[in-house]
Amino acid sequence: YGAMFLWVVQEVNNCIKWENDSDIRSSAGVLDIFGFESFAVNSFEQLCINFTNEALQQQFNKFIFKLEQEEYDRESIDWAFISFPDNQDCLDTIQARPKGILAMLDDECKLGQRGSDKNWAKRLNETYLPDKNQTVSANTRYSASKMQQAKGIFCVRHFAGQVAYTAETGFLEKNRDEIPLTAKSLFEEDSSDLIKEIYDVQLGASEEKTDSGKPAKAKTVSQQFKAQLSSLIEMIETTDPHYIRCLKPNDAAKPKLMTRKRLTEQLRYGGVLEAVRVARMGYPVRLDHAGFFKRYRMLLPSVAEDVLPWSMEDEDPQNLCVKFLDVLLEEGSKPVSYTNADGSISRANQIRMTQRQPEPMVFPKADVQLGVSKVFMRKGPHDKLEAHRVFHQNASSTLIQSWMRGMQQRRRYLIMEDAALTIERWYRGCMGRARWWRLREAQASLLLTNTFRMLINRRKYDRSRRGTILLQAQYRGRSVRKTNAAVKVQAYRRMYLCSTAYRKLKSATIAIQCCARRSAAKAVFNEIKREQKDMGKLKEHNEKL
């Protein structure tokens, strides 16, 4: 697998490299390395990874020191007394010859079958802990208690913390990483050109080249690792590096969840805390002149305008900052007094007296240096200035809050007063309306009583009137009916008499008419009978017909 990996890397580099390396003017590379490792049981792999992180941390410290040096020179700051930490002793403990951990591991591997992890751990303890009861080495990088020595465990204090390595986890076997003889013969005699090419790449990486005719010596994994790491560091030093630190917020891969302990470990193992500590050893706080003056002018409220102006208009920022620093140190050395010239104490000073007093603004002037465009401060003076700034801000905010609370109370009082007056007016209105309603109810009850009495009397009157009218109607109806009946009887009687007389007259008239007609008819009949008997008349009739 290792040979295949080396062959793939070589083929990829051959495909993407430029024809002539001397023509390359600039290039960009990405170095991705896992962070510092510390497990329950740490072995050869963790030692190599932590060794790499230690070397890269040293390069990072040098890079930070270089940036600091360039900025201090650009701003004309005296920085000769600033010392930065160096972890070279830790690197020497791991790689230096002949007493380095990896160097002694290589020596133990050369012993062949006589070498073992236990003997290697014993040699380490004899080298770094020569005294009988000694548990920490002289450079404090190597340590092992008596119990750890018995178990074959040793500790190395890295920049990120102390790590315990267990020697009896196959350190020698992993460092040798030898190919078995049968595998060698199989690879050398294989008919596949690809297998032979891959095996040649492996031999080139694992064998040490010699100028003489002697056979090449096999390199251990630690020797290969140190050579590659040394080449990497040399290449990084020729570039302009930019660092990106990736942090994993939690191990559960959940959103909006941040584990403080996990993040702190990553910051420590990634060297961020060490970089912050390196930066703090110099002048970690840097502000431009205008920002510095505007931020800390409030610390001297009692200084008159003609001594130290509040505005930066028509003023040189650097000279104004120098003047401000001198006045600040002069005022800071004086005892604090909150009384005015007439013995009175203002409201703001009363509030300041009740608060916790910060440390006096007394510090060496060299801890605050003025550059060409920036003000450089150490942590101590910056903390004191920030403490006084927070102190004055708290006093001012408390004063503003007291005014605001007073305004709120006055506003609340006026609102309550207006509400009370409104409630009183409403209550009086309710009482007046209740009284008016009672009067109205009394008047309405009187009117209702009168109306009820009127209705009762009217009902009695209507009943009497209807009875009288009904009685009169019945009496008048009876009288009319009696009169009408009498008239009707009389009419029927008269009609009967007239009808009887008429019928009699009619009967007599009809009888007379009948007698007359009978007589006439008889006369005509007799005339006809005589004519029929006359033959002349008969012929005349026939002719007429």
Image: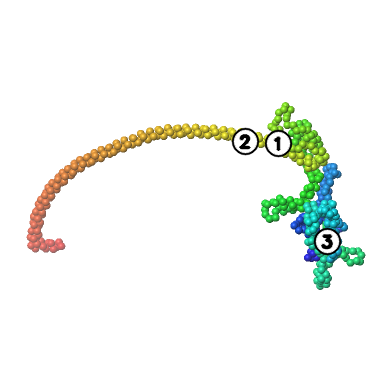
Left/right placement of residue 256 relative to residue 506 reads: right
* Mark 2: secondary structure: helix
Would you say the residues marked 1 and 3 are in contact, meaning their CB atoms lie under 8 Å apart? no
Left/right placement of residue 524 relative to residue 168 reads: left
Mark 3 is on which residue type?
Answer: Asn
Q: CA distance from mark 3 to mark 2?
A: 81 Å
* Mark 3: secondary structure: helix
Mark 2 is on which residue type?
Answer: Gln
- In the picture of the structure, the residue carrying the numbered disc 3 is 119
Note whether 18 is above or below 373 in the view shown: below
Residue farthest to the top? 342
- Front: mark 1 or 3: 3
Q: CA distance from mark 1 to mark 3?
A: 66 Å
Q: Position of residue 440 (x, y in %)?
A: 42, 33
Disc number placed over residue 355 in the picture, else none: 1
Sequence-earlier tag: 3 or 2 = 3
Mark 1 is on which residue type?
Answer: Gln
Disc number placed over residue 235 in the picture, else none: none
- In the picture of the structure, the residue carrying the numbered disc 2 is 408
